[in-house]
């Protein structure tokens, strides 16, 4: 039998130990190779992560370089800009709306006359324009209607209207700011005027010539109107102030803008002309009395 196996049997039998050793070594090398493979895979993962992070950083740096950052100035370096507020000029409406209405008094009219003629008359002429308290009727204390006020200041009205017989003249002249106000005041005269005749003296829809004819037709006791039309009638001799006894000014009434008659420039100018056209001279002679309603 040993001859049949020949030399191959020896080689296989003699290398059996060697093959076992190599097998063991091979078994021992396998886990180390696996470990090496794991470490290499982990390194690859970390490398890829770091590469991704590096790319992101580059992109961010590029964006920051393209878009310049707005530098906010320090608190100390910020320029302080002071805005100037324009002060609004106070109008008559603003002043009157914030104050309580006060009834007019003789000193108000005297102050208005002095202020208006201060640069138009000499010192001597201004002294002649001064109105004494004796030239005035009692003023309205804002509690009266027009009829009740006139009954107070004209207690002998029935006798006075009977004595008046001159045409183109009136005994009582009421001065107001507008045509609408004229109509309102004439309606308020119903309980006072009695048999006296009243006429409207304003420019709206009525010509001067028509009013001159009305005054010439018959006796008129009361005239109610605006300063402009009254001055025009006096200039054309359609209205005579020689018979005038009472000049009542619609002083305390105010329009929608809270303006009085003398607060409106054009009406104020006509009013001053009216005072110069015989009213002030009549006051000094003791014929005319002025009332502030």
Image: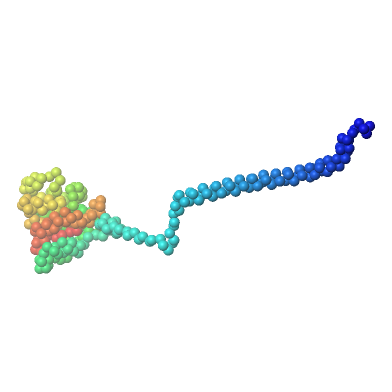
Q: Report which quarter residue 173 is drawn in.
A: bottom left
Residue at 12 percent of width and 63 percent of height = 120
Q: Considering depth in this image, is 218 or 69 the residue closer to the camera? A: 69
Residue 188: % across, % down:
20, 50
Q: Is residue 136 visible?
A: no
Residue 248: % across, % down:
16, 56
Residue 16: % across, % down:
86, 40
Q: Considering depth in this image, is 78 or 183 the residue closer to the camera? A: 78
Residue at 8 percent of width and 56 percent of height = 241
Question: With 12 as the anchor, is 226 left or right in this view?
Answer: left
Location of the N terminus by quadrant is top right
Q: Is residue 127 above or below residue 279?
A: below
Residue at 56 percent of width and 49 percent of height = 54
Residue at 15 percent of width and 46 percent of height = 204
Q: Is residue 193 visible?
A: yes
Q: Report which quarter residue 134 is drawn in.
A: bottom left
Residue 108: % across, % down:
20, 62
């Amino acid at each position: 039998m040993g001859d049949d196996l020949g030399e191959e049997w020896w080689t296989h039998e003699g290398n059996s130990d060697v093959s076992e050793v190599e097998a063991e070594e091979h078994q021992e090398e396998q886990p180390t190779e696996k470990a090496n493979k794991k470490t290499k895979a982990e390194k690859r993962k970390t490398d890829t992560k770091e590469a991704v992070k590096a790319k992101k950083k580059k992109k961010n740096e590029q964006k920051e370089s393209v878009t310049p950052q707005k530098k906010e100035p320090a608190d100390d370096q910020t320029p302080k800009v002071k805005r100037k507020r324009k002060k609004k000029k106070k109008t008559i409406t603003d002043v009157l709306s914030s104050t309580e209405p006060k009834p007019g008094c003789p000193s108000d009219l005297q102050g208005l006359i002095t202020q208006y003629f201060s640069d138009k008359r000499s010192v001597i002429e201004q002294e002649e324009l001064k109105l004494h308290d004796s030239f005035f009727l009692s003023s309205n204390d804002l509690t009266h209607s027009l009829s009740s006020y006139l009954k107070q200041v004209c207690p002998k009205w029935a006798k006075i209207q009977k004595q008046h017989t001159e045409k183109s003249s009136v005994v009582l002249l009421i001065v107001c700011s507008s045509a609408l106000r004229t109509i309102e005041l004439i309606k308020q005269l119903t309980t006072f005027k009695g048999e006296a005749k009243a006429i409207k003296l304003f420019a709206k829809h009525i010509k001067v010539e028509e009013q001159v004819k009305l005054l010439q037709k018959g006796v008129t006791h009361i005239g109610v109107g605006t300063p402009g039309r009254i001055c025009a009638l006096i200039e054309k001799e359609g209205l005579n102030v020689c018979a005038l006894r009472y000049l009542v000014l619609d002083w305390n009434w105010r329009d929608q803008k809270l303006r009085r008659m003398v607060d409106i420039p054009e009406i104020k100018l006509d009013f001053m002309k009216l005072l110069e056209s015989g009213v002030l001279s009549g006051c000094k002679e003791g014929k005319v009395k002025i009332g502030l309603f």
